[in-house]
Image (tube, grey):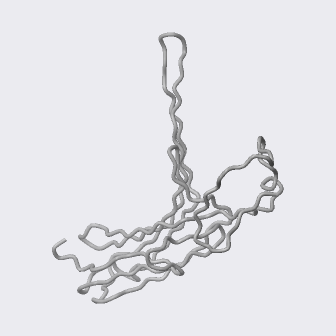
């Protein structure tokens, strides 16, 4: 916009370095701030935050019911696994708050549920997590900032089911395993 007073509007998460994707696990606290930089004084109606985690699955199956009848059945489901809302700035009385020019920080934090599934993107579904901040101002379209983050479900590799040999595998078989890993000292052994 030509007369937009917002110079910067971003969501930042604590504990992440520039250029790296934030990674969390279930039960962990997520903390950060919404940064708002204004070129001039601005009237603000509200600043709201929403954290979401959504799992989605979709696939189709084609079936035949005789020689001349065929149909396709679609299956889909959406499940919300995280839904946290917070108001970071709201007027005490009246409709607006007048913010002066400059940099403004609005901290936030929330706890992720204990059991969350790992982030995933696939052909038939996805599990995505994100935080969205929305800046509401009178007579100006709402401004949004979004930050995507990854959730990894911890796996105990000492669980008996994971220690069991893979069916069809025999100790005499050999093959090549390519491991691309940034940590030195990682080794694989075959019992």
Vertical order, 109 against 71 (above or below): below
Instruction: Count the numbered circles shown.
Output: 0
Residue 152 relative to residue 137: left or right? right
Q: Residue furthest top?
A: 67
Question: In this rendering, is residue 27 above or below 128?
Answer: below
Residue at the location (52% across, 62% down)?
129
* Image-quadrant location for residue 48: bottom left
Residue 22 drawn at (x, y percent): 52, 72
Relative depth, front residue between 146 and 152: 152
- Give the quadrant of residue 90: bottom left
* Residue found 54% across the figure and 15% down from its top: 65
Q: Is residue 128 above or below residue 6?
A: above
Q: Position of residue 134 (x, y in %)?
A: 38, 70
- Which one is in front, 120 or 75? 120
Left of 53 or right of it: where is 41? left
Measured as percent of width and height from the top left, residue 77 is found at: 55, 44
Name the image quarter holding the N terminus.
bottom left
| Residue sticking out furthest to the left | 2
- Residue situated in front as seen by the camera: 90 or 172: 172
Which one is in front, 67 or 103?
67
Who's the residue at 54% across and 22% down the image? 63
Residue drawn at x 31%, y 86% as measured from the top left: 99
- Left or right, 90 with respect to 60, comes to left
- Image position of 87 with respect to 37: above or below: above
Q: Name the image quarter holding the C terminus.
A: bottom right
Residue 117 rendering spot, x and y as whole percentages:
63, 58
């Amino acid at each position: 916009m030509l007369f937009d007073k917002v110079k910067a509007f971003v969501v930042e998460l604590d504990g992440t370095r520039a250029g790296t994707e934030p990674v969390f696990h279930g039960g962990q606290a997520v903390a950060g701030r919404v940064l708002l930089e204004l070129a001039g004084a601005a009237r603000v109606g509200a600043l709201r935050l929403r954290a979401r985690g959504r799992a989605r699955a979709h696939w189709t199956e084609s079936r035949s019911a005789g020689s001349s009848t065929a149909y396709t059945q679609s299956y889909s489901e959406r499940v919300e696994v995280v839904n946290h809302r917070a108001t970071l700035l709201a007027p005490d009385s009246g409709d607006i708050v007048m913010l002066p020019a400059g940099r403004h920080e609005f901290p936030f934090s929330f706890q992720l549920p204990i059991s969350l599934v790992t982030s995933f993107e696939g052909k038939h579904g996805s599990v995505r997590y994100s935080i969205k901040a929305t800046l509401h101002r009178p007579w100006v379209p709402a401004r949004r900032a979004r930050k995507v983050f990854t959730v990894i479900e911890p796996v105990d590799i000492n669980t008996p089911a994971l220690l069991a040999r893979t069916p069809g595998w025999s100790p005499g078989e050999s093959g090549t395993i390519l491991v691309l890993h940034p940590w030195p000292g990682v080794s694989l052994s075959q019992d």
